Image (cartoon, rainbow, N blue to C red):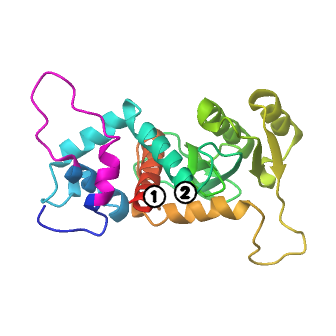
Amino acid sequence: MSKAYPSNLTRAQYEVLSELIPAAKPGGRPRSVDLWEVLNAMLYVLVEGCRWRSLPGDFPAWQTVYTYFRNWRLDGTWISIHDQLHQWVRIDAQRYPSPSEAIIDSQSIKSAAGVHQQVGFDGGKLITGRKRFLTVDTLGLVLRVFVSAANLGEREGGKRVLKRVKRMKKKVSRLITIWVDGGFDGAPFLMWVMDVCRWIVQVVLRPEQTKGFSLLKKRWVVERTFGWLMGCRRLVRDYELLPETSETLIYLAMIRIMVRRLA
């Protein structure tokens, strides 16, 4: 590459990731592209918010970059890399690989013009677009993400993202408590979590007399994670035709954060 971009991985960061990147498939033409450059191109799109077709010329061809991004989404490579880095970061922070507590929250984001699949209107936030449901541990690291139309209710979205967390199995074997805000409150949701997931839900409500900003127990952790994601311009608005692509970009943003910590 002829230019060093702020979003690029350092050599030390790439060495951490290189252990987790799948090897080339046997047979056919040998892999000729440098995966370090491919990953840098993906991070450029994520951080700078440009289109795939607008990648600078010193990156590999955008078709090659997007093909790797899409194929690794379809075969689960991004999830696998994310989960392994998540365990390494927790161990590096002297925590158990499996968290015992998690926090759920949602974020409504406007969708870009031309995005019509699974787009809705959030009457509470007055936003037309999509809603991101995040489950994070107490370090603010993402466990699972679910992206839907913005008109999906908090409790229904909470159920769907918790189903994904439940499927992590041994990776969340110590999980006991789920912290939520008032939007997830209600006996049907609380009982569903206890009966299906075997977890306890703790609701943290905003004090009635409080005006302006208030630091709420546990809930500030997931709000900070949303702030981390807003550092990537591609995530400030939902430009993706498929919600699954939006989810993958969130995992990629967290991979970038975690690999920088480990390196």
Which residue sits at x=31%, y=34%?
71
Q: Say what amino acid the circle numbered 1 marks.
A: Leu
Tell me where residue 180 appears, x and y as whole percent: 76, 51
Tell me where residue 61 appears, x and y as whole percent: 15, 48
Task: Name the residue nearer the viewer: 188 or 122.
Answer: 188
Task: Name the residue nearer the viewer: 175 or 203.
Answer: 175
State which region is magenta: 12-35
Which residue is outermost to the bottom?
Answer: 212
Tell me where residue 222 appears, x and y as whole percent: 64, 58
Q: What element carries label 1?
A: helix
Left or right placement of residue 209 versus residue 19 in this view:
right
Left or right placement of residue 142 versus residue 152 in this view:
left
Which residue sits at x=25%, y=33%?
23
Which residue sits at x=57%, y=60%?
225
Which quadrant is home to the N terminus? Answer: bottom left
Picture disc at residue 235: 1
Total tally of numbered discs in the picture = 2
Left or right placement of residue 254 versus residue 223 in this view:
left
Badge 1 local density, few (<14 within 10 Å), some, or many (20+)? many
